[in-house]
Image (cartoon, coloured by chain):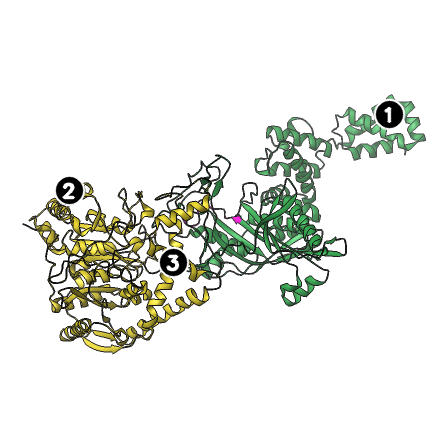
Amino acid sequence: MLDLTYEAPKVKTISGAKSDWELVIGMEIHAQIASNAKLFSGASTKFGAEPNNNVAFVDAAMPGMLPVINDFCVEQAVRTGLGLKAQINLTSAFDRKNYFYPDLPQGYQISQLYHPIVGEGEVLVEMGEGIARRVRIERIHIEQDAGKSIHDMDPAMSFVDLNRTGVALMEIVSRPDIRGPEEAAAYVGKLRQILRYLGTCDGNMQNGNLRADVNVSICQPGAYEKFIKTGDFSHLGTRCEIKNMNSMRFIQQAIDYEARRQIQIVESGGSVDQETRLYDPDKGETRSMRSKEEAHDYRYFPDPDLLPLVIEQSWVDDIAARLPELPDQKKARFIADFGLSDYDASVLTAEAENAAFFEAAAAGNDGKLAANWVINELFGRLKKDALDITQSPIKPEQIGQIVSLIKSDAISGKIAKDVFEIAYSTGRDPAEIVETEGLKQVTDTGAIEAAVDEIIAANPAQVEKAQANPKLAGWFVGQVMKATGGKANPKAVNDIIMTKLGL
Amino acid sequence: MTDLNKLTIAGARDALRKGDVTSAELTQSCLAAIDGAGALNAFVHNTPDVALDQAKAADARIKSGDAPAMCGIPIGVKDLFCTKGVASQAASKILEGFTPEYESTVTTQLFDAGAVMLGKLNMDEFAMGSSNETSVYGAAINPWRRAGDAAALTPGGSSGGSAAAVAADLCLAATGTDTGGSIRQPAAFTGITGIKPTYGRCSRWGIVAFASSLDQAGPMTKDVRDAAIMLQAMCGHDPKDSTSATLPVPDFEAALTGDIRGKTIGIPREYHMDGMPAEIEALWAEGRRMLQDAGAKIVDISLPHTKYALPTYYVIAPAEASSNLARYDGVRYGYRAALGKGDGITEMYEKTRAEGFGSEVQRRVMVGTYVLSAGFYDAYYNRARKVRSLIKRDFEQAFAQGVDAILTPTTPSAAFGLGEMVDADPVQMYLNDVFTVTVNLAGLPGVSLPAGKDSQGLPLGLQLIGQPWAEADLLNTAFALEQAAGFHDKPQKWW
């Protein structure tokens, strides 16, 4: 496997009134596991169903109902763990987290506090060419999502939608290795990318399928290094948790606001209270949700309805063997095999579908040229039509044809754009378009010579001017191209004109 | 035939197969008995229409020659079982008006085998109690009375309605559930047989949960053979219950040879409790002698952690219950308190649960919440879990020494009077479970059968505890003891 080497990014500092401060950030990402059925019931997870339609007796916590684990969700969690190079725990167990809320029908959430299914792993978060933060993953556990309470439909009553109740989530807990708002957003982006590559979460943040709780604290420069060395949290500031963020932009804004809030408190002699906060994107500020004293006592204990979850190493190995190529590997391979720039490789590997499209287009072709065509022409055109790559009217093989037509001098880059447009809007094959429309570049020097001779003969005054000032020879090139309908090979035209004019 | 309701399952089965009787006749006989037994307060929801339909179907099935042992047998169902379209409220106000859209696995299996449901049976609220007095329906009454005394006695609990109904011949048999002794103690108090199988033998799906790691369903019957027949129909693997065992179910009735020669029976010395009535001691000694006479080898054994069983149980069971009962919140089904002006969700929870749960349930929810709370978890819940594994190990060691079954009294006393314990410390009531909770904590099968009477003429039970999954062997030992004890007494009808 190819590996690129990275340097750690510089730590962002924020200047307070009195001194500079650094940020320390850890994140808990709740990622909805991509599966057709819920974690412990057979109910559908389809988004957008009528309220309370995707609800089994288990989800509604009817008396006597029992949870039965959905093996596919377990497989997805294992696949995610493997994708994050993490330890897979062959024995894990489910615990109940007890609290009362109308959208939590059981009165407890089934989670994995004491024995999570996935242990330590890591995510490489690129912050520029050759620069990346290695964020350690502490654990991933499987748990149930809650339902949705709706308070604004009726002045006197609240409504509850249990469609989401019992949907499987993975909680991916990072170490406090993230050092700035940009890194935090990039971390979420990278995790999202990996999950989408793995097919274990669709990463749809708008629908709430990927949400983040962000722990933020501030410290003096040098303190974080002491923490890393000793593992002693007292070197760090008191952290606040910003709950339930589902936009990378808001995550960045909220962290920035929160850090400045904490700096102001500390610099004016106060101390930060450990608490849970919410970000209000309209006001651009975080506000207290509940203090440490108000924190729930969740009374976690092992769920007696479920036996410990025991999986076989051979099963894990089998999942590992079927793991797709992940973004880091793919990017490194694109750079090595196709000679792409770091930037182009990043763009093309952002989504697995883009990468696959590019690879099909570049097969047996000039990779760099194919990359240009995919990134500049195709992506631009798709964006204009608000289409994604899977909806592209032009097939990767057709882009490949254009690239090879250019490469073999059959068409010029300029003609290629016309061919692309026709192929994009009609679905016809570029090779066929070039043939049928007679767009093939003229490289027959005899034909070009004849055209040059004709133009020279008809324009003696221009010949004189060009011979006096060779820069004016370009006029002849333009005339020849015009006469040949743009199909003449521009380089051949230029060479012949220069020779004929004796330049 | 007359008094069809007095038949055993085995007797009725044979009569049905011979065509001497129909299920409809059996069912009518039981329905009449139920109608005449309102004073026992055993049945709390009667389902005569369901019963007669099922009986008709059963008769057709018997006629066609396709008749499993339970086919056409009228039974009662403890109110803890969810029965489709029939009120199922765990004897609690909080489940007032709740009618499930689903059928528990155990009752599904019984009905698939052709059993006929007469109705739902009284019990302690959420199966929490040993006297039936915590029921929202009021206590079921024991058909037995002390000689020359009309005072109402408890049928025991929590499966008190089941016990009373079987003892009074209102049904041929009944389902029960047992978390700490709730099948065995009422069986002992009413002179019937009840078995709690190994944890995982019967599916818990569709049974209102009390303490999930302890709850097991089992049959309550007129004799050991019936227990074998009915257990057969109730148990087996259920993919809907993750704790249900995937083991095959042996033919329990076929195991009833009565031959226990060469078996080793353990007598645990720690079960000799201070202050235990001499009659109980005597009965236990008698049981020991009877098993010895039947050819078993008797050995004294030690189960050293027995004394911790009751406190351990009363930490673990309430802990699980506090969580299991969180779902009764007034939001989706059952009782919801009337709310005052300005009341919000917190008030709805508080009022609903304060009004919907009885005091014993509230006590256990509070105890359970306490033992799981931050700062107390290790001292109580975690410690109890550790002691539980020591109690289990005690049994494993005894079995490893070659013990096939263990003989103990079922209860430390005969049935007591209703209301007698009302002012007592709740722990006094909990002492009823002293001989039975160990079996639940260890997940073992335990059977109680009547073996004699006390000086006031009340039945007394003996308990046999078996190895895990050895119900067939355990039932055979119980069968041998039953034959030796020859207890065939019935309560004098006063109702």
Color used for chain A?
Answer: green
- Identify the residue position indicated by label 3 in the image: B320
Q: Nearer the viewer, residue B30 or B247?
A: B30
User: Are marks 3 and 1 in one subunit?
Assistant: no
Q: What amino acid is labelled 3 in the image?
A: Glu
Q: In x, y percent, where is residue A164? A: 47, 43
Q: Is residue B155 left or right of residue A313?
A: left
Q: How would you rate the neighbour count of disc 3 (Cα within 10 Å): few for under 14, some for 14-19, many for 20 or more? A: many
Which chain is the one coloured yellow?
B
Which chain is disc 3 placed on? B
- SS at mark 2 in the image: helix
Q: How would you rate the neighbour count of disc 1 (Cα within 10 Å): few for under 14, some for 14-19, many for 20 or more? A: some
Locate the N terminus of chain A and report the quarter of the image it occupies: bottom right
- For the point 29% across and 50% down, the residue is B90
Q: Nearer the viewer, residue A89 or A22?
A: A22
Question: In this figure, what is the number of numbered marks?
Answer: 3
The magenta segment is: A31-40
- Identify the residue position indicated by label 1 in the image: A456
- Identify the residue position indicated by label 2 in the image: B56
Q: In x, y percent, where is residue B84? A: 28, 44
Mark 3 or mark 2: name the one nearer the start of the chain: 2
In the image, residue A302 sits, relative to residue B36, either above or below, namely: below
- SS at mark 1 in the image: helix
Q: Is residue A336 left or right of residue A447?
A: left
Q: What amino acid is labelled 2 in the image?
A: Lys
Residue at far front of view: B423
